[in-house]
Amino acid sequence: MRRDREAGQALVFVALGMVLLSAVLGLAVDIGYMRFLKRRIQTAADSAAIAAAAEINYGDVTAAAKADAASNGFTDQANGVTITVNNPPASGPNQGVQGYVEVLISKSQPTFFIRVVPGGSTSSTVTARAVGRLGNAKGCMYSLQSSLGGSGVTIHHGSVVNAQNCAIIDNGNLTVHSGATLTASAIGVGGTVSNFGSPVTPTPQTGMVLASDPLAYLAAPATGPCTTLPTINSGTVQVFQGDYCAINVTGNGNVNFNPGTYVINGNGVPCNGGPPTTGFCINTTGTVTGAGVTFYNTNNTAVTIHSAGSINLTAPASGAYAGILFFQDRSNSSGATVNGGNSPRFEGALYFPNFGATLTLNGIGTSPAIVVVAGSIVTTGGTNGFSNSFSVYSTGSPIKDAVLAE
């Protein structure tokens, strides 16, 4: 009889052990799956935060975040998923900071085995949080040719192009003639590379996917009736922001552009022997200065700068056109020529985005804050230094990339 009682006790212990083992195994399975789900949700939140940040200058960050999360398998208000987008963040070290976007993803997930254990939970909520922001883009020289066979970037004999801390993005073909020097942190080319024996660092990478306009978010300024500004060919003249039919500085004229936005929307003037269709003409042995200025060129006129004197132009440090020095109407395919002359200083973006617009540079000097965007880019001589650091600008470079901040 005692053996029967002992056998019965053993069965009880075995039964209890099986329940305990089931609970442990169930807990291990559920915890393992929850950890797997947590990784998936965190990955989706990170991606959604970057997608949301990329839309800060363009549109609806909430829609962008939710669409990106859905592409990663987490659709808001479906299958227990809730997505919250806060612009700016509602928590964390960047709470309330403009230019940052917070994405929170939570999912209520039924448990598998632990629910059969007395007192076990039938579901568990898994959450993840990520914050994206806009940071300075890696590129500082963009050729936007719309086809792989376009002319892209051309570096002529005697030209030095120095972009050591930033990248060159060339949708078209890259051509480097003998006697030139090209240096960048990276060089991406959509078309082909032709190098006639010049040093190029690093080796260009071909087959690049065509890049889009990195400043497409900029809204063009309003235009009104233009004011005729007399030609400045001598003396020193103060010019103030406004709408001008043309700006023409020649001879030994000196001009100071006061801070503001200058809209050029007339029919243009002759400049340096060229056709009478130049909207912004600098052809002087004098001095040209302007701090906190943006020049918007429209009405199919060109920009021509041939300075044999001193030129010092810097973009605004804040406002709608922070970091934008020249902005050409996107429908304007006229080319632009910038020859900086003696000790030139150009600070800000030179933006000529039409696919047919060729920007020709011949010695623009160096600056901690200069980027160029054009249909095609040609350098014909002199030192042409590019940098996207924009360290003196509170908003940084006007060309942005979305990055993960938290």
Image (cartoon, rainbow, N blue to C red):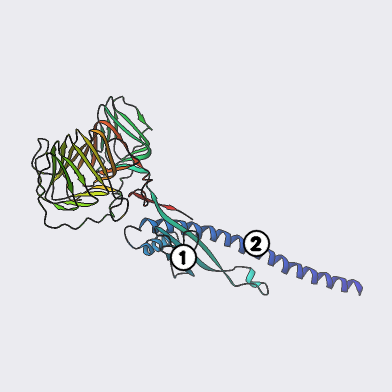
Viewer-proximal residue, 31 or 406? Answer: 406
Q: Is residue 159 above or below residue 222?
A: above
Taking the image as shown, residue 377 lies to the left or right of residue 167, namely: left
Residue at the limit of the structure toward the right, as seen here:
2
Q: Is residue 112 visible?
A: yes
Q: Position of residue 39 (x, y in %)?
A: 53, 57
Viewer-proximal residue, 114 or 224? Answer: 224
* Mark 2, secondary structure of its residue: helix
Q: Position of residue 269 (x, y in %)?
A: 9, 43
Viewer-proximal residue, 280 or 337? Answer: 280
Q: Position of residue 259 (x, y in %)?
A: 25, 51
Q: Is residue 329 above or below residue 337?
A: below
- Residue behind mark 1: 90
Q: Residue at x 37, y 40 (%)?
A: 166
Q: Is residue 213 above or below residue 376?
A: below
Front: mark 1 or 2: 1
Taking the image as shown, residue 231 lies to the left or right of residue 102, namely: left
Q: Are marks 1 and 2 in contact (CB under 8 Å)?
A: no
Q: Earlier in the sequence, mark 1 or mark 2?
A: 2
* Mark 1, secondary structure of its residue: loop
- Residue behind mark 2: 28
Q: Is residue 149 visible?
A: no
The amino acid sitting under disc 1 is Ala
Taking the image as shown, residue 15 lies to the left or right of residue 355, namely: right
The amino acid sitting under disc 2 is Ala
